[in-house]
């Protein structure tokens, strides 16, 4: 009997020591998201800007987010694991370095104000994520090809989330230039990503308009010309705001990985709708491509 009591005491105090001093988090919050892990991470980055937090990307693509909640400085450690082509399991481990021993001991036995505040805070994120997902649609078509064309373009660099802004800032210049010089358009505008840094969410891209090639073309300091070559690619149809069309990049990348297709991480987006005309964003259509390696 005495050995049993000593054994129980040893295990009990071992659990307490692990819980208080070894476990790397205070508690976790988990939920299922109807999207891919990469899209979860992108939505966390959007939410982080809204709450003025800071983010650090880990080597395994997890995110560590620093937030100020009431008078608490907290760390949210985000981990998203893919369950299927359309769902992920998201686990957020919460750490408060200033949490008292008594508060920490209370966590397993009751819903503390600390836990309730964090859950309410994460509910705000879930609302943002679900609103984003309701306002986009991505359909993977599969193997396809992109026609070649001669085009006028402006090279741009910036962050993924600012891609649409970069286009809008240069739309007026291109439109006025075409009108003033009587250049004939020959297709839908598109962007060609020339470099995609997934660690920093930075991109270099060309904002292009297909044109009729002539022997002599007017010159402009910002506007360049080139032949865009035809290529084989995998294709998706994206409906939604152009600010989040990069969600289709991750969807195509996932499709390629699942089907053993080697692709080049230089997406191409062809815009079939003009956002300046307004309307329901779900009716805006973009054809998105990832080129297949030769």
Image (spheres, rainbow, N blue to C red):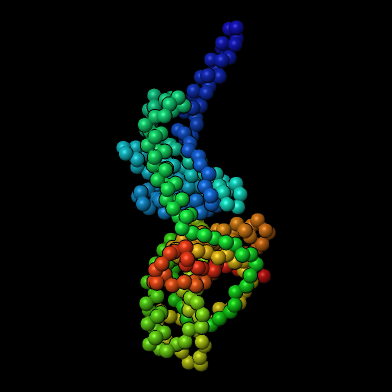
- x and y, in percent, of residue 176 in the image: 37, 82
Question: In percent of the image, x 36 and y 31: which residue is there?
Answer: 113
Q: Is residue 69 above or below residue 61?
A: above
Quadrant of the frame with the C terminus: bottom right
Please state, as top left, top right, bottom left or bottom right, where the N terminus lies in the image: top right
Quadrant housing residue 105: top left
Furthest residue to the left? 71
Q: Quadrant of residue 250?
A: bottom right
Q: Quadrant of residue 253?
A: bottom right
Q: Is 166 on the left-hand or right-hand side of 1?
A: left
Q: Is residue 200 above or below residue 293?
A: above
Rendering coords of residue 122 (x, y %): 42, 43
Residue in the foreground of this view, choosing between 8 and 188: 188
State the image coordinates of residue 170 (x, y, percent, origin top left): 39, 74
The structure residue drawn at horizontal position 53% and vertical position 19%, both measured from the top left corner, is 12
User: Residue placed at 50% from the left, 68% from the top?
Assistant: 285
Vertical position of residue 97 compared to residue 36: above or below: above
Q: Which residue lies at the image location 40% right of the left edge and 50% below the top edge?
A: 48
**Residue 7 vertical position relative to residue 158 in the rendered view, above or below:** above
Report whether residue 111 is seen: yes
């Amino acid at each position: 009997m005495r050995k049993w009591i000593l054994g129980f005491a040893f295990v009990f105090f071992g659990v307490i020591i692990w819980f208080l001093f070894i476990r790397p988090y205070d508690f976790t919050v988990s939920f299922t998201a109807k999207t891919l892990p990469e899209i979860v991470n992108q939505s966390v980055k959007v939410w982080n800007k809204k709450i003025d937090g800071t983010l650090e990307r880990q080597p395994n693509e997890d995110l560590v987010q620093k937030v100020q909640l009431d008078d608490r400085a907290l760390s949210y450690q985000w981990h998203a694991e893919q369950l299927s082509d359309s769902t992920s399991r998201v686990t957020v481990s919460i750490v408060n370095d200033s949490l008292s021993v008594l508060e920490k001991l209370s966590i397993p036995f009751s819903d503390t104000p600390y836990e309730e505040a964090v859950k309410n805070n994460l509910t705000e994120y879930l609302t943002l994520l679900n609103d984003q997902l309701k306002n986009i649609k991505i359909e993977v078509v599969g193997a396809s090809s992109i026609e070649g064309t001669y085009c006028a373009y402006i090279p741009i660099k910036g962050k993924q989330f600012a891609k649409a802004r970069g286009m809008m800032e240069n739309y007026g210049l291109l439109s006025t230039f075409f009108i003033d010089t009587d250049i004939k358009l020959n297709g839908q505008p598109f962007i060609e990503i020339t470099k995609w840094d997934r660690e920093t969410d930075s991109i270099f891209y060309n904002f292009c308009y297909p044109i009729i090639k002539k022997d002599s073309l007017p010159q402009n300091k910002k506007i360049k010309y080139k032949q865009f070559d035809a290529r084989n690619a995998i294709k998706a149809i994206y409906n939604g705001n152009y600010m989040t069309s990069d969600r289709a990049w991750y969807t195509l990348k996932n499709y390629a990985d699942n089907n053993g297709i080697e692709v080049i991480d230089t997406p191409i987006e062809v815009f079939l709708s003009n956002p300046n005309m307004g309307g329901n964003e779900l009716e805006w259509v973009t054809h998105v491509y990832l080129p297949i390696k030769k």
